[in-house]
């Protein structure tokens, strides 16, 4: 089994510039809990991207960042409306439910994207003491199935959130991939669309650990966040080592270079499958760094014996292949060659 694979974008190592930043941050003593210079500089770098009202709080991981951000804004009798496949709903071991005490309303969606209509359908029982009260919308950008909300789609959700008094939360574990895919700036993606709070991912994009909770503009939950973060066990005492990674990630747009590369590799991989389209089809359009092929059932086990990846939907034979900041063109061809060998085209012969 090759040691480079497509199982997850967090299987890649740490970008050398980030390792160097970690080593540089290891120089001397610095105040803890975010009172250090690197944290201040990195907060300023986020403000430069988003505007003077933006606030950023660093956390250890994405699950914790999502949970403490939502905790800062919601009461335990409130719900979060999210797509059924949301990481928050299926991959966080009910952390939200346990720590925040609220309820996730996870709704079936198309192509991974929640719409204003999906949200409106859940807006009932408001003011009824027997019913959980809708408090937030949560989406992932890019989505769990590798699609990307357009700015117009985000604006429509932002407008729904505003008129319905809901928090608009974005799980941005892969926000960089979405920004790179749309070719917009972060301010357009988060401020102009009405996003209230976003988990800005690092781990999938070249950092060793750590995520940033970003409030793109002023929001009252900013005042509660320091407390929910500490109570939620996401406050790093040696904060400089998280901040220094984000400082390096934002410098010279490394976050976008890494993400654009991962996206390009996913497109290359999807391109290699195009000639196999009588055997392998795509379950979702490739818009960021993920490819979701529908595999011939008999090819799944042989391919998994040779290459490491996860099945997304066993019943539908849909696999999930993720590209990373360090995926190479050779990695893609090597992987695609294995697919061609194990699931050869039926109509066409050209490899
Ligand atoms: C969409 C999404 N959100 C959040 C996370 C954060 O996960 P973790 O708690 O492992 O950092 C992930 C990681 O797989 C993810 O894919």
Image (cartoon, helix red, strand yellow):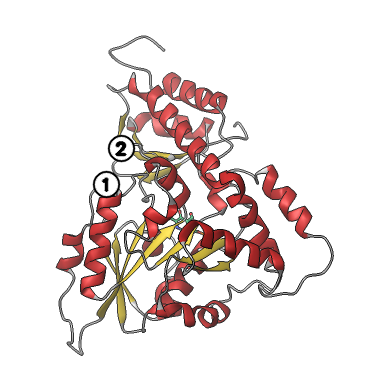
Q: Residue furthest right?
A: 28
The percent position of residue 165, horizontal first and vertical second, equals 25, 76
The percent position of residue 11, horizontal first and vertical second, equals 58, 45
* Residue pointed to by mark 2: 285
State the CA–CA distance, disc 1 to disc 2.
8 Å
Position of 311 relative to 47 (above/below):
above
Q: Is disc 1 in contact with disc 2, using a CB cutoff of under 8 Å?
A: yes
Residue at (51% x, 33% y) in the render:
305
Nearest the viewer among 307 and 53 is 53
Mark 2, secondary structure of its residue: loop
Label 2 CA crowd tier, 10 Å (few <14, some 14–19, many 20+) = some
Residue at (27% x, 21% y) in the render:
278
Residue at (50% x, 56% y) in the render:
49
Nearest the viewer among 273 and 159 is 159
The percent position of residue 85, horizontal first and vertical second, equals 33, 56
Confirm or reject: label 1 Cβ below 8 Å from ligand 1.
Answer: no
Answer left or right for 112 relative to 69. Answer: left
Mark 1, secondary structure of its residue: loop
* Residue pointed to by mark 1: 111
Precedes in sequence: disc 1 or disc 2: 1
Q: Residue furthest bottom?
A: 129
């Amino acid at each position: 089994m090759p040691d480079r694979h497509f199982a997850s974008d967090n299987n890649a190592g740490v970008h050398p510039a980030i390792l160097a930043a970690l080593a540089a941050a290891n120089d001397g003593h610095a105040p803890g809990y975010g009172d250090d210079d690197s944290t201040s500089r990195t907060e300023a770098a986020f403000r430069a991207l988003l505007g003077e009202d933006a606030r950023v709080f660093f956390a250890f991981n994405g699950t914790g960042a999502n949970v403490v951000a939502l905790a800062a804004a919601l009461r335990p009798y409130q719900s979060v409306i999210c797509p059924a496949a949301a990481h928050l709903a299926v991959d966080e071991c009910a952390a939200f439910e346990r720590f925040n005490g609220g309820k996730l309303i996870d709704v079936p969606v198309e192509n991974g994207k929640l719409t204003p209509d999906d949200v409106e359908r859940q807006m009932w029982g408001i003011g009824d003491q027997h019913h959980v009260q809708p408090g937030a919308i949560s989406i992932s950008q890019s989505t769990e199935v590798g699609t990307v909300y357009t700015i117009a789609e985000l604006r429509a959700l932002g407008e729904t959130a505003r008129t319905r008094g809901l928090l608009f939360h974005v799980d941005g574990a892969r926000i960089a991939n979405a920004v790179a895919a749309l070719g917009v700036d972060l301010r357009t993606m988060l401020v102009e669309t009405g996003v209230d709070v976003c988990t800005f991912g690092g781990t999938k994009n070249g950092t060793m650990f750590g995520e940033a909770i970003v409030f793109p503009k002023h929001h009252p939950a900013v005042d509660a966040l320091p407390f929910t973060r500490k109570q939620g066990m996401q406050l790093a005492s040696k904060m400089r080592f998280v901040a220094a990674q984000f400082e390096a990630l934002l410098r010279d747009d490394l976050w976008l270079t890494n993400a654009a590369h991962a996206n390009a590799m996913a497109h290359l991989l999807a391109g290699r499958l195009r000639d196999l389209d009588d055997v392998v089809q795509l379950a979702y359009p490739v818009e960021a760094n993920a490819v979701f092929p529908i595999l011939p059932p008999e090819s799944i086990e042989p391919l998994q014996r040779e290459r490491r990846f996860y099945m997304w939907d066993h019943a539908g034979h849909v696999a999930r292949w993720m590209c990373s900041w360090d995926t190479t063109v050779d990695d893609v061809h090597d992987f695609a060659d294995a697919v061609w060998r194990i699931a050869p085209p039926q109509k066409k012969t050209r490899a």
